[in-house]
Image (tube, rainbow, N blue to C red):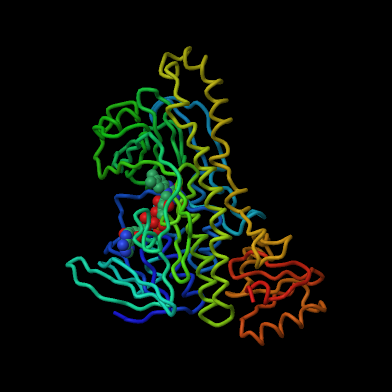
Amino acid sequence: METHVPVLIAGGGPVGLATAVELAHHGVRCLVVEPRESVSWLRPRAKTTSARSMELLRRWGLAETLRARAPLAVSWSDQAVFVSSLLGREITRIGGCFGLDLTGSGLAAEPGQQVPQPLVEEVLREAVGDALLTGRQVSGLREDADGVTVRITSANGEEQEVRAQYVVGCDGPRSVTRQAIGSRYEGREDGRPNFNIVFRAPGLAERMPHGPAVHYWVLNPAQPGLAGRLDLEETWWCIAQGVREADPVRLVRNLAGADIEVEILATDPWTARMLLADRYASERVFLAGDAAHQNPPYGGHGFNTGIGDAVNIGWKLAAVLHGWAPASLLATYEGERRPIAADTIEAAAANMTTLAPELADPALMGDEAAFEKVRPAVAEAVLRTKHSEFHSLDLVLGYTYAGSPIVAPDAGERLPHRWLSPGESLYDRLGPAFSLVGDQSAPGVAGVVAEARDLGVPLREVHLPGEPLTLVRPDQHVAWRGSGSLRMALGR
Ligand SMILES: Cc1cc2nc3c(=O)[nH]c(=O)nc-3n(C[C@H](O)[C@H](O)[C@H](O)COP(=O)(O)OP(=O)(O)OC[C@H]3O[C@@H](n4cnc5c(N)ncnc54)[C@H](O)[C@@H]3O)c2cc1C
């Protein structure tokens, strides 16, 4: 094991791995310390990878790999269906969920993708390669003016020290890193328990009358919850809301509405939390992902927000380590990312105010006449309260860094994607570092090119005849339009 690394990442969940991939994208070495030898197939948690995360995976050259291995193709379904039971009647449905309908769209270079979190982690683990050190955990860290000394403990209690210039704490809810820098979660926990089950149900899909869907919400008051397929074979996930302990077989059968054949593979109780770290960083240690923020899973934002953190801190660390920017650039990380986590927590908490138990109605379980009588009102309530949970592109694609000191007053938003030729997004022309997009014969070009040369910053010129100049940051956000300097965008 190396004893000196530029960056040490505590935690190899999706966010720690994404941070490592981002650093590698800029040619920066790191070490990811992760206790789990392999990914947790029976604890799939996230299933929604957002359109924005897919764009970032495309930037790393991993979007196609992930899609090719995802058991549910994006074309398979973009529907959420609300039903009386898995085998029962349909109440209503919502289409175009989670940006899954964005294939070829002018809005995003990639549609979202339904894929179990362990598969995302596996693809990222492969990309990280031998920078991932499993079977160890970070047990403490000591920061001084020149770096951070990190104590690493193996499963058998052996201890070692690694010296890093910077540490990124991606070690999840019980983050050792967060405690080490004296940061604290602020917020609250939802009172209701939840119970996840992963199960096999041979023949269930074939018997269901509802067709393909990424979510099936069961609005039976006796057993409300939601379920979906993990693959197109026999494996399913479900969440029972308001349940702490339960007979999992009984629970699945209640959601199905019949005594189906079921084999329980795993159970995973959890509680929704709305928590935000009061600070994201010390001088040399930065928090990302669930270590910094936690939100309810409704809307599918948790790790996607963390991928945004990973890219933001990753390029900035690379800029400082390569000498393009002063260390003070790193102080912009918290200011840019923390407000987005706060907005995400608020949106996810709002999604949680109306779940299956609130939408359920006993009349839905009655005879045909009783069902038809109540169905329009329940359907209306579903569409009124759940639409924004499944359609949140304003949050997913629309977040901005407006107001940050390293973007111009009218900038900070994600560079709008557009197709330049079939299958070629404007994003595909950008460089890994900064890009100057627009007409390269414009008078402002020479100055920015000279600045890049003086500072040693790689700058990709993307010629779009007749178009105004736009300086695009490594994370595809706009630093300025029209005119401006590279120095400002690097906090110099
Ligand atoms: C039911 C459910 C559904 C969800 N659905 C979605 C969804 O659809 N979309 C979405 O984006 N999010 C979803 N989430 C949230 C998502 O699972 C989390 O946001 C995500 O796992 C956070 O990733 P992370 O890498 O920050 O943290 P984690 O996944 O918690 O990873 C932290 C890592 O750090 C390691 N670690 C812990 N302590 C140490 C230590 N001391 N030293 C070194 N390593 C350590 C752990 O082993 C772990 O691998 C869902 C969550 C739940 C509960």
x and y, in percent, of residue 487 in the image: 67, 77
State the residue in front, 287 or 115: 287
Q: In this view, does 311 lie to the left or right of 156?
A: right
x and y, in percent, of residue 356 in the image: 44, 30
Residue at point 70% right, 71% down? 471
- In this rendering, does residue 455 appear at all? yes
x and y, in percent, of residue 427 in the image: 63, 66
* Quadrant including the N terminus: bottom left
Residue at point 76% right, 83% down? 446
Residue at point 47% right, 17% down? 371
Which residue of the protein is positioned furthest toward the bottom in this rendering?
454
- Ligand 1 shows up in which quadrant of the image? bottom left
- Residue 285 falls in which quadrant of the image? bottom left
* Quadrant including the C terminus: bottom right
- In this rendering, does residue 70 appear at all? no
| Residue 163 versus residue 121 in the image, above or below | below
| Residue 12 versus residue 233 in the image, above or below | below
Residue at point 29% right, 76% down? 161
Q: Number of callouts in the render?
A: 0
| Residue 398 versus residue 246 in the image, above or below | below
Which residue of the protein is positioned furthest toward the left in this rendering?
156
| Residue 448 versus residue 255 in the image, above or below | below
Q: In this view, does 151 lie to the left or right of 365?
A: left
x and y, in percent, of residue 125 in the image: 37, 67
- Residue 189 falls in which quadrant of the image? top left
